Amino acid sequence: MANLKELENTMPVAPLKIIPLSSMAEMGKRINDLMVVYRDYINNDPVKNDPAFHGYLEESYLVDVECPRFGTGEGKAIFHESIRRKDLFILVDVTNHSITYRANGYINHMSPDDHYQDLKRVIAACHGKARRINVIMPFLYEGRQHKRSGRESLDCAYALTELQNMGVSNIITFDAHDPRVQNATPLNGFDNITTPYQFIKALLNSEDDLIVDKDHLIVISPDEGALDRAIYFATVLGVDTGMFYKRRDYSVIINGKNPIVAHEFLGDNIEGKDIIIMDDMISSGGSMLDTAKQLKEMKARRVYICCTFGLFTEGFDAFDAAYERGHFDKVITTNLTYLPPEIYKKPYFIEADMSKLITSIIDFMNHDVSLACVNDVTEKIHHFVNEYNSRTKSI
């Protein structure tokens, strides 16, 4: 864990408790196991007898809570243990469609609205007894409905305001579609965590012959919205960047959005270079696959797709077909959101594990230490890339 001295020199806000909702049960277990190991490693025996550190070293930090449903589909949250004066961290994945419940004899898959409602139920069940409530929501609820165009709702801004009014002190999200949505609650804690270190680590661990320099590698943004992300990544790696401009038909609306007519590339010659495409999410994947196809037609050597959230809303058939045609080489996504079990059998898939990062975030926040200790990864990336380049040169 980074910057251990910061933790050793500060006291926790309150005894730590982790509440993974059903949508993040597996990730919650990983985080809990890591936290037990971390704290046992960092602290010595005197901590066990210090009243100020009561509840600091535990065999488990998970809370016994459930959200049962009535026959109509209505629900509630129930705590089976006390959470009085605890520092709560509630984990929720609003995109996990694999969770089901029965309503009037029918099986329903939980939607983002269902997960968000369960989150509010758990917060409401605290009865104001918790010392502090923190919400870790990797994929920000309604994050793509972050601004108003005409007669539209402002769902994300309203949700943030609602959570603030319910007593949530901090909201931690990852790679928000537009982090400026935090302006809806300017006095509330809002941290938008990026994942460039986990991406480059996963990619370089999977390839033995990448050359990370401006003559052999380029980072591409698939649209103007992801350009800042691509520029940062390219700058840290010391390589060039480029982008695609999505030309849309604004006279037509299909499925709530203007269809893309063409992707126009803005950048230098990419012939013979390895390409990293950076974006925040893969939804259906059509736009991303079209970008990858064009890059290969422009004689790119290899194309790697790096996206924080692999949603794959229309399954994997299009990705399987594109991989068979050689349009891309690897897809790297995090495990911050639900990934169907079959994805782990795909020859092109690489997982960027985020459990250690989330554990560090929780530990630092429990100590009220700046998250800059966790989020500033430039030096870590430089160190990892230098080690990789030294290793590849010696092969």
Image (spheres, rainbow, N blue to C red):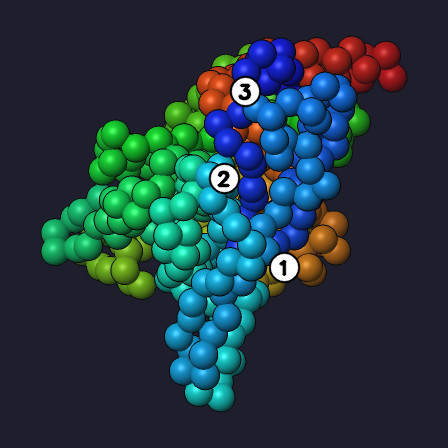
Question: Splitting the image into 4 quarters, where does residue 292 fall?
Answer: top right
Answer with the quarter of the image where residue 244 lies: top left
Nearest to N terminus: mark 3 or mark 1: 3
Residue drawn where x is 65% and y is 52% of the image: 26
| SS label for mark 1 | loop
Residue in the foreground of this view, choosing between 21 and 246: 21
Percent x, y for residue 87?
49, 37
Q: Which mark is residue 101?
A: none
Residue type at mark 1: give it.
Pro
* Viewer-nearest of discs 3 and 1: 3
Q: Position of 209 compared to 227: left or right?
A: right
- Residue beneath the point at 36% across and 41% down: 168
The residue under label 2 is 86
Please name the amino acid that badge 2 sits on. Answer: Lys
Residue position for label 1: 340
Left or right of 74 on screen, residue 149: left
Q: Amino acid at mark 3?
A: Met
